[in-house]
Image (tube, grey):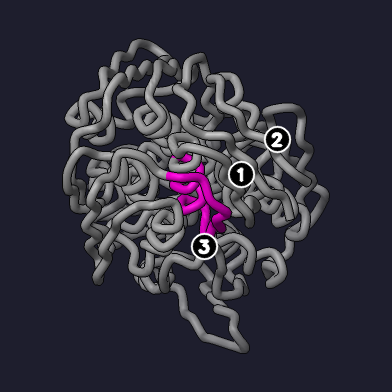
């Protein structure tokens, strides 16, 4: 397994490019199962482990997926399979999104209960109840979920929680079901808007994506399309928080400040100066951050995927800050590793109280999941001395060439194979 070695305590200064959004690219790539015509997904973070896993998933189901730089071309090779392989699904939770297009097209799909990061139960019951509202039947068999519906029905589906994955799965299924399907209490993330734009290019008509009510006018036959994925707001937010922790001046290119309003507002309260324009965001930090408490919420609130990076920043704050996690349970596993670097964190239930210290110290630490790994990387950049992060494969699931990008801002980061 690779490791990252960071010589911290150096201010960051430079320009860092932001990749396409992984969390937008994954459902869009899987939505290519809706058509037999070629599709091209551009601005795709093709170096990411999850994107490569998605390519393998598509190929295992009967597609040909070709990586061409920052684009993926998906073509048909004949008939599609309706059973997703466990050895792929267990690696990536987003694999369950294959259920929607396959069920809508063929009336039957078998999908293993998915894996992914160890940050809680993350049940898929919201997905399943949504499919049932559209007329599907489900049974469990040896760790798999089998969904069947001779013909899915359009209608009104109300989610008990605005789940991003369930919203995406139901939108994708509805795109291939003639008639109007309305999803209420839908997730509002920018990635949902991007999926809606892609489904519309395929021939469906999606309105309301990005609001609490999404309407999909489906069609029995969809065609191919070319689509450019939106910027990765979580990667951009991570780099902004890293710049605030290590101090200095960092400019992000290919970023959308409109997707990060809650995060930018919180960064400004810490004392950072944040400016933005069309396709760029710039952050300057010259002092120790002020303590700012946050509470994670569905979009447009503070994102759960930036909770761990924010906690890393607050370990350096001049005072006390609370971090409240309301979306996922078991998402404070990074706290113990931050403590190895000198952080003072008391976590109980869904709340962590952070008492800021003037300086963290480098140490050997270990990533437990994707966003926890990002938090440790931020802490290492700000800490005095040498830090070695193991289990870097977690970080590689969501951050493309992270050591090369940080090096452009003057960070001393080396990957050991």
* Quadrant, the N terminus: bottom right
Circle 3 SS class: loop
**C-alpha distance separating marks 1 and 3:** 20 Å
Which residue is disc 2 drawn over?
Answer: 72
Local SS, label 1: helix
> How far across and down, in percent of the image, does residue 341 sit?
44, 51
Residue at horizontal 17 percent and vertical 43 percent from the top:
319
Q: Position of residue 184 (x, y in %)?
A: 24, 55
What residue lies at 60% left-to-right and 29% top-to-bottom?
412
Please rate how many residues cluster around mark 1, counting C-alpha atoms within 10 Å: few if below 14, some from 14 to 19, many from 20.
Answer: many
> Which residues are drawn in magenta?
361-378
Residue located beneath label 3 in the image: 117
Q: Earlier in the sequence, mark 1 or mark 2?
A: 1
Q: How many marks?
A: 3
Residue situated in front as seen by the camera: 295 or 387: 387
**Residue 209 at least partly seen:** no
- Asked if marks 1 and 2 touch (Cβ < 8 Å), the reply is yes
Q: Position of residue 162 (x, y in %)?
A: 28, 56
Mark 2 or mark 3, which has the lower sequence index? 2
């Amino acid at each position: 397994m690779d490791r990252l070695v960071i010589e911290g305590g150096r201010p960051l200064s430079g320009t860092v490019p932001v990749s396409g959004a992984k969390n937008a690219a994954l459902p869009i790539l899987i939505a290519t199962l809706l058509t037999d015509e070629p599709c091209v997904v551009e601005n795709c973070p093709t170096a990411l482990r999850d994107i490569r896993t998605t390519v393998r998933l598509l190929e295992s189901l009967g597609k040909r997926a070709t990586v061409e730089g920052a684009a993926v071309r998906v073509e048909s090779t004949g008939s599609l399979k309706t059973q997703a392989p466990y050895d792929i699904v267990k690696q990536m939770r987003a694999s369950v999104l294959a259920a929607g297009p396959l069920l809508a097209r063929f009336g039957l799909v078998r999908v293993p209960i998915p894996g992914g990061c160890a940050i809680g139960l993350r049940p898929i019951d919201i997905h399943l109840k949504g499919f049932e509202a559209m007329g599907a039947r489900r049974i469990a068999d040896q760790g798999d979920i089998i969904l069947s519906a001779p013909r899915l029905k359009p209608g009104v589906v109300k989610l008990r929680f605005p789940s991003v994955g369930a919203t995406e799965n139901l939108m994708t299924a509805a795109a291939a079901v003639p008639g109007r399907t309305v999803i209420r209490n839908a997730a509002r993330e920018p990635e949902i808007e991007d999926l809606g734009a892609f489904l519309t290019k395929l021939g469906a008509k999606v309105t309301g994506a990005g609001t609490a009510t999404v309407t999909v006018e489906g069609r029995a036959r969809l065609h191919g399309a070319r689509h450019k994925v939106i910027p990765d707001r979580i990667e951009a937010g991570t780099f902004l928080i890293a710049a605030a922790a290590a101090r200095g001046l960092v400019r992000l290119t290919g970023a959308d400040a409109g997707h990060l309003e809650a995060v930018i507002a919180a960064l400004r309260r810490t004392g950072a100066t944040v400016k933005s324009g069309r396709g760029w965001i710039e952050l300057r930090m010259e002092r120790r951050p002020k303590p700012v408490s946050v509470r994670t919420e569905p979009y447009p609130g503070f994102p759960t995927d930036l909770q761990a990076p924010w906690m890393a920043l607050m370990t350096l704050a001049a005072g006390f800050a609370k971090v409240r996690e309301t979306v996922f349970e078991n998402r404070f596993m990074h706290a113990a590793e931050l403590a190895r670097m000198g952080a003072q964190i008391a976590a109980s239930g869904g709340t962590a109280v952070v008492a800021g210290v003037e300086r963290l110290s480098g140490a050997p630490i270990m990533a437990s999941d994707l966003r926890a790994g990002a938090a440790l990387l931020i802490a290492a950049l700000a800490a005095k001395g040498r830090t070695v992060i193991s289990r870097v494969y977690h970080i590689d699931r969501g951050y493309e060439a992270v050591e090369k990008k940080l090096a452009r801002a003057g960070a001393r980061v080396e990957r050991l194979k």
